[in-house]
Amino acid sequence: MKKYLYLMITIIVGAVILFSGCGNKDGKETTIENSLGSEDKIVAVVDGFFTTMQSGDFSKMTEYCTEDVLASQQLDVFTDEEALESALFERFGFARTGLTLDDLNNEAKEAIVNAGITRMSNLINSYEISDVSVNRKTAEVTGTVTYGYDTEYDIDVEGFIAEYRDSFSTDQVKEYANIYANEGEDAMKKKMVNDMLPGLMEKYSSSLQVTEGATNTLHATVEKIDGKWLITALNITPAEEAGVSE
């Protein structure tokens, strides 16, 4: 039975995958005043995009960019509370366990959402705008951004497995075995996932923060649409690919 439980842990932990999205880490609030000149307004829009993202208040992102930009940076899901749990369940790969979102209890669902928001709101540690070029109703903004962690970080699956395996008490093993015997494999899997997921997501979030993020180049297109400046395109490229040294 223990061997079977360890196999299930491997499947559950191995289901977690990384996903990227697209922030000055001081949490300042940015407003755009009508008295500002065009260049200042454009800078304020880019500031607003990053600082709002860093605050985790994703519902306000469309004040600074188009829906297409949100989608391109995988931020669109964070503006729809009803769809967020389901989308993160898929993005983190938990569907691979054979369970559905409805199989999770509220604590497990909350853990997934918190991990997703933590990852996105901490993605960009700092940014710097180096140039703004305005041509009537279109502007090109360039600069650099530094990630808050290594976006290529690989989860230590074996480490997670060992930790959870070693934490199993005899009573827990008996409980899972009883569920398996009386209710079947699916019921036991559901119980295991709900028990493990909060701790797994917390461990996942904390492990990201000890990694070092890279410096990247920033290129944003900002356009005046119906009298309002909005980011219509956003590209964050590794510095080495753009020929920029850190």
Image: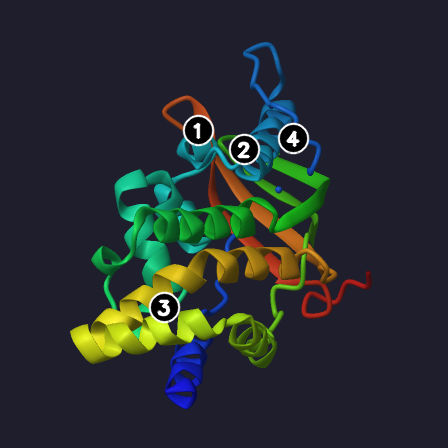
* In this rendering, position of residue 161 left or right of residue 187: right
Question: Which is closer to the viewer, label 1 or label 3?
Answer: 3
Please state the horizontal and vertical placement of residue 91, each as a whole percent of the image.
38, 63
Q: How many marks?
A: 4
Residue position for label 2: 52
> Hey, which quadrant is residue 26 in on the image?
top right
Residue type, numbered disc 2: Thr
Residue 241 shows in this picture: yes
Nearest the viewer among 116 and 26 is 116
Residue type, numbered disc 1: Glu
In the displayed structure, 30 sits above or below 140; it is above
Residue position for label 4: 27
Residue contact between numbered discs 4 and 3, judged by CB atoms under 8 Å: no
Mark 3: give few (<14), some (14-19) or many (20+) Cα within 10 Å: some
Residue at the extreme top of the image, as rendered: 35
Q: Earlier in the sequence, mark 1 or mark 2?
A: 2
Residue position for label 1: 63
Residue position for label 3: 192
In the displayed structure, 9 sits above or below 226; it is below
Please state the horizontal and vertical placement of residue 37, each as a whole percent of the image.
62, 18
At x 57% / y 19%, what residue is drawn? 31
Mark 4: give few (<14), some (14-19) or many (20+) Cα within 10 Å: some
Q: How far apart are marks 4 and 3 (CA)?
A: 37 Å
Question: Which is closer to the viewer, label 1 or label 2?
Answer: 2
Identify the secondary structure beneath mark 4: loop
Mark 1: give few (<14), some (14-19) or many (20+) Cα within 10 Å: some
Identify the secondary structure beneath mark 1: helix
Residue at the extreme left of the image, as rendered: 183
Q: How far apart are marks 1 and 2 (CA)?
A: 10 Å
Q: Earlier in the sequence, mark 3 or mark 2?
A: 2
Q: How far apart are marks 1 and 3 (CA)?
A: 41 Å
In the displayed structure, 187 sits above or below 116; it is below
